[in-house]
Amino acid sequence: MPFIPHTEEEVRQMLEAIGASSIEELFDEIPDELRFNGLKDVPDAMSEMEVAQLMQARAQADGQPLCFIGAGAYDHHIPAAVWEIAGRGEFYTAYTPYQAEASQGTLQLLYEYQSMMTALTAMDVSNASLYDGASALAEAILMAVRANRKSKSKRVLVPRSLHPAYRRVAYNIVRNQDIELVELPFDMTGGHTDPAVLEQYAGEDITALVIPQPNFFGVLEEVDALTDWARANKVMSIAVVNPLALALLQPPGEWGSEGVDICCGEGQPLGAPLSSGGPYFGFLCCRQAHVRQMPGRIVGRTLDLDGKPGFTLTLQAREQHIRRSKATSNICTNQGLMVTAATIHMALLGGEGLERVAAGCNTNIGLLRDMLTGIEGVEPIFERPVFHEQVVRLPLAVKDVLHTLSAHNIQGGFDLSDDYPELGDALLICATEKRTRDEMQVYQEKLERLVQMQSKSCGAVPAG
């Protein structure tokens, strides 16, 4: 946005209009002891060119590390056109469309986004986004509790193989509403939730079952069996999915004999840069039967009095629009700009492009796994198929390895020891379509050298 300062004449005219002799007079009510007497440690002002040079130098000092971290946020290629279009003023600065008739462009974009998400997930309805994937799961759980009126227990089965951050966020949001999250163990050989563990809950009053695909380890779950168990036991099913993976994998609307009830997840892989953790956006889709329980907004397409197509907010079940007692959520905004970028991203790539990206990710994780497990002492932990992430066990402390790799401009993966200590020195690695064979070779060589040095010294990993 351009910076347009006021001239001294404009400032004088404004002060005259309000009857003040100076800007200082506007603050004469502030006691002297509370006033700030200058920024002593702030250097002299710099020109625009000098500031740009300083920031470029600092950015270069950070380096451009090779990223092999996934764990919920992924380093995908984003076509330049995505943010060139999303950065236009009509998108970049547009606000919430309260008056639908005055916001046709924004509403049409949201309608297109919803259409794309329902096609990708094979669900009936999509809302116009949430804050992020973790809060989307929490909203999905609350939605399931409202929708499953036959269940009185408010017990929700949550696999331990689900993203730890998602589990923590969901717990913090739902715990004060008397909702119990019951943890399901994962199979130590496959890294998945064995459908057999559900048999102990058969016939009990269970409100919902959460099904990740892929799960936090990158492992593919037995989604058909899990979904059918939920349906047979009158349990609501909630899918937590990576939207990019759905370009290759069976969509949740087709899991089992009838599909899941609710689908949610993180939309970051669809055009949102890593950006040090955000902003991202969450998505939420469901079956038509549950649409009245869906939080957020839904945009619909209609015809005006002249028979011309138009767009309008059809369901707005939130506090700003209806009585609090009738609201399904207190969400008061969404990640509209991220949704704009995601819509443009999906439109540019199309179904074929998304499939090619997903296939590239899957090819690369197989290549990276083979390279790293070729190092003596490095081995895969789980034996089931994965999507663009894999857990490997190292013969030395993961924290030390990651610290040393970072010193060599390599972000080597996500340390699982804090969240899953039972796995030992386990490292979650990721390879998106952006990673090249040469980059993987650099990673492999650095890790192999660390292992060899450890083997020779039988001591600590060197610091750099």
Image (cartoon, helix red, strand yellow):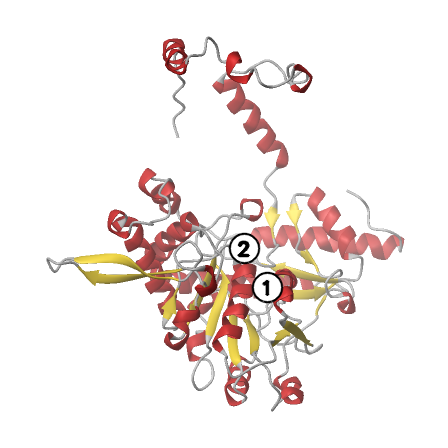
Residue flagged by tag 2: what amino acid is it?
Answer: Tyr
Q: For the residue labelled by badge 1, is the local secondary structure a helix, a strand or a loop?
A: strand
In-image side of 113 versus 102 (left or right): right
Q: Residue 83 in the image: state x and y as whole percent.
A: 39, 44
Nearer to us of marks 2 and 1 is 2
Q: Residue 284 in the image: state x and y as whole percent.
A: 45, 65
Quarter of the figure with the N terminus:
top left
- The number of discs equals 2
Residue 74: quarter of image: bottom right
Q: Which residue is mark 1?
A: 389
Which residue in the rendered view is the most extreme toward the right?
A: 458
> Can residue 309 be seen here?
yes
| Cα distance between the residues tagged 2 and 1 | 10 Å
Q: Which mark is residue 85?
A: none
Q: Which residue is mark 2?
A: 74
Which residue in the rendered view is the most extreme toward the left?
A: 306
- Residue ID at (29%, 49%): 99
Residue 309 vs 276, above or below: the answer is: below
Q: Residue 438 in the image: state x and y as whole percent.
A: 57, 51
- Residue ID at (37%, 69%): 125
